[in-house]
Image: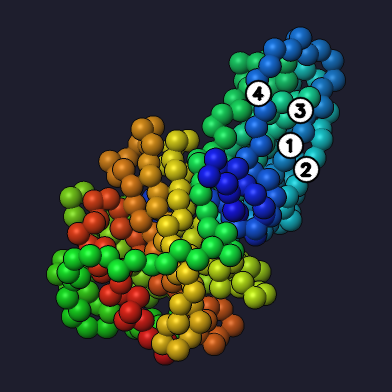
Amino acid sequence: MPYSREGRRMRAPVPRWVSGLGAAILFCYGGVFAIGSAARVAAPLTGPVTVTYLIDGHGRADVALELPGGRREEMKDVGLPLHRDIDVHAGQPVSVIATAAGGLLVRCEMQIKGETVAADTNHIASCTVTPGDRSTYRPAPMGPAMELAQSDDIMKLPRYPGKSSPVIGRLTDRAAGLSYARLGGGWASPSREQLPGAAGRTLSLWVESRPERGWFALYGSDRLSPELFFSYKGERRLFQAAMAQMETFTWIYSPDTIFVDLVSQPLTVDGREAWVLVRQTRMGAKADTAIRSELQTLVLIDTGKERPAYLYVRMPDPAQDYLPDVNRLISSIRVL
């Protein structure tokens, strides 16, 4: 979802193989995530209270509403955005949990009399409030600041300075329909012990990982997640699908995390149309990680099959000495 430089969305519209990847974003193409209102002094609430909840994101979500008296309402595979009013009595807690489809990000927000009293953004977003009890009002965090590429942005991939790692062979992902360089010079397949920290989701056919100063750089390939196929349509299909797939790798480390898209550019890869995105995640002081920033690169390629394929590269900081490998990997891609 496109955002302004102040982190407010302007308009609204994964293998599962990298945990700890960087968060938010929220997508590319419809709705309003960052809605805020200044806290204001109000008289104590009594009697019936109308709580408004909003669920917004790219795509669809499962929504569960917890009501007083142990009542629970569930909505499966709901199209977003979703906007509902519920009536409860002051002093009775109410909560909503939204789980986005396909590993995307989703935002929940609760309002009382136009005031935001709860907000959360994540792959699973949760909001809880007790009307009339202001100690339960937690409008912050409003989510990380985001500066995401717009559909008409062209920000070119740089030629990273320095020497890239040697190529010692090729990796072939027949399911995705791609092959690309196998890098040496320290790159190696992750051990079974390393996998939980480097790739908690299901790996695609190939992934290379480097334990270096306490962090892992990795790269791998796959096809566009089937749950995200809805984004692959229209003239901007490659951009839209690349943004959606990137969102699944974007994790919210802390409320003060910042996401910035540095590159958004059409490419020709082995004679095929493609789109490259580079997203930088800057962890805030509240992030419980030794990593302070990371770069994620995703190249989505129209291979001629129903679902496009992609190559994904993650380089946590400090990774500057390996950035030339990004250029080498992209230039090595071949469509099978």
How far apart are the alpha carbons under marks 2 and 3? 13 Å
Query: Which quadrant: the N terminus?
Result: bottom right
Numbered label attached to residue 114: 3
How far apart are the alpha carbons under marks 4 and 2? 21 Å
Which residue type carries mark 2?
His
Q: How is the image coloured?
A: rainbow
Q: Is residue 256 above or below residue 179?
A: above
Residue under numbered circle 2: 83
How far apart are the alpha carbons under marks 1 and 2? 6 Å
Q: Position of residue 247 (x, y in %)?
A: 52, 57
Q: Label 1: how many residues lie within 10 Å, few (<14), some (14-19) or many (20+)?
A: many
SS at circle 4: loop
Q: Which badge, 4 or 3, is on the more N-terminal residue?
A: 4
Query: Which quadrant: the C terminus?
Result: bottom left
Instruction: Choose mark 1 or mark 4, whichever is in front.
Output: 4
Q: Residue at x 47, y 35 (%)?
A: 255
Residue under numbered circle 1: 53
Q: Position of residue 45 (x, y in %)?
A: 78, 13
